[in-house]
Image (tube, rainbow, N blue to C red):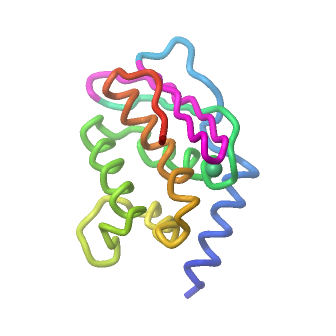
Amino acid sequence: MSDPRELYQQVILEHNKKPRNFGRLTPCTHRAHGLNPLCGDDIEVTLNIENGQIADIRFQGSGCAISKASSSLMTVNVKGRSVEEAETMAGQFREMIRGELDPSSAPNILGKLSLFKGVKDLPSRVKCAVLPWAALHSALKGVETTSTE
Ligand code: ZN
């Protein structure tokens, strides 16, 4: 068994070095911009939704290691899912980061995303981790800009 904290560090580093689904979909059916002025993270999410499913998703922008790794992991985890599932996941991720949901005891669909649960103890990083999920939520709702402030 490896230390979850060590595993978390590894995943952050790995996704930073090789972000998955990086770029922009043109054309796209949904998009949103997420801003976290506190840290300077600026992320754009573009999606193609077909028949209620996320057929494709990309992200681009600039930000700290946590916002970038969180965006990369988000795209991997929501791609191919229904809009409904993606919204459930976004909600559970937010609750976990705020310390309201413990993924080891409460039922959830977070899977590998539960690696981020330690972020709840790092208040200055909470908004960085949640930013891509806030942008996804806005995109799905048809709102084009969202800010964590
Ligand atoms: Zn950040």
Magenta highlight on residue 45: yes
Residue 52 placement, left or right of 44: left
Q: Residue sitting at 37 percent across and 69 percent down?
A: 99
User: Does residue 128 sit above or below 58 in this rendering?
Assistant: below
Residue 31 placement, left or right of 19: left
Q: Quadrant of the N terminus?
A: bottom right
Image coordinates of residue 100 in percent, x first then y, are 30, 67
Magenta highlight on residue 81: no
User: Does residue 79 sit above or below 13 in this rendering?
Assistant: above
User: Does residue 105 sit above or below 69 in this rendering?
Assistant: below
Image coordinates of residue 145 in percent, x first then y, are 47, 25
Helix, strand or loop for the magenta stretch, by majority: strand
**Residue 2, image quadrant:** bottom right
User: Does residue 49 sit above or below 81 in this rendering?
Assistant: above
Q: Residue sitting at 76 percent across and 51 percent down?
A: 17
**Residue 109, image quadrant:** bottom left
Q: Residue sitting at 59 percent across and 34 percent down?
A: 43
> 89 or 21: which is nearer to us?
89
Image coordinates of residue 14 in percent, x first then y, are 70, 58
Q: Residue sitting at 71 percent across and 52 percent down?
A: 16
**Magenta highlight range:** 30-52
Image coordinates of residue 118 in percent, x first then y, are 51, 72
